[in-house]
Image (cartoon, grey):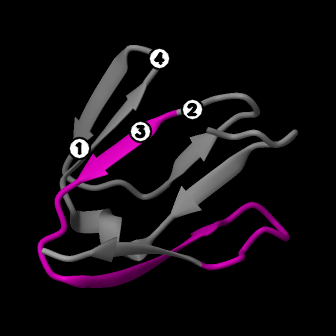
Amino acid sequence: MNHGEIAHQLETVYLYKTPAAVVHTGLRVEAAGVEFLRLQPDAAATLTFLPQVRGRFPFACTIEGHRGPGWLTSSR
């Protein structure tokens, strides 16, 4: 959920080649990879993927001035 006043954009290189599904307002999209997920203010989406390896994967909001790092973690 984007509680902010501007759009936010999730990006992680790991998902470029990882099968994933995105669900937003009744729409479900499955893809062989996801380059980024952009959410407008007050929008919500669910990104689902199955990591192929165990580890931590960096992600960031790529909107200018927002590149605070976050982590996706897999215990697979």
Mark 3, other Cα within 10 Å: few <14 / some 14–19 / many ≥20:
few
Secondary element type, mark 4: loop
Q: Disc 3 designates what residue?
A: 46
Mark 4, other Cα within 10 Å: few <14 / some 14–19 / many ≥20:
few
In the rendered image, which quarter is residue 76 located in?
A: bottom left
Q: Disc 4 designates what residue?
A: 25
- Identity of the amino acid at label 2? Ala
Q: What stretch is highlighted in magenta?
A: 45-69
First along the sequence among labels 1 and 4:
4
- Left/right placement of residue 14 relative to residue 10 reads left
Q: Is residue 23 above or below residue 57?
A: above
Secondary element type, mark 2: loop
Which residue is located at x 38 percent, y 80 percent?
Answer: 57
- Do callouts 1 and 3 mark residues in contact (Cβ within 8 Å)? no
- Do callouts 3 and 2 mark residues in contact (Cβ within 8 Å)? yes
First along the sequence among labels 4 and 3:
4
First along the sequence among labels 2 and 4:
4
Secondary element type, mark 1: strand
Q: How far apart are marks 3 and 2 (CA)?
A: 7 Å
**47 falls in the magenta region:** yes
- Left/right placement of residue 65 relative to residue 7 reads right
Mark 1 against mark 2, which lies toward the viewer? 2
Numbered tag placed on residue 31 in the rendering: 1
Which residue is located at x 23 percent, y 66 percent?
Answer: 17
Mark 1 against mark 4, which lies toward the viewer? 4
- Do callouts 1 and 2 mark residues in contact (Cβ within 8 Å)? no
Q: In this view, does 59 lie above or below 20?
A: below
Q: Disc 2 designates what residue?
A: 44
Q: Distance between the residues labelled 1 and 2?
A: 19 Å
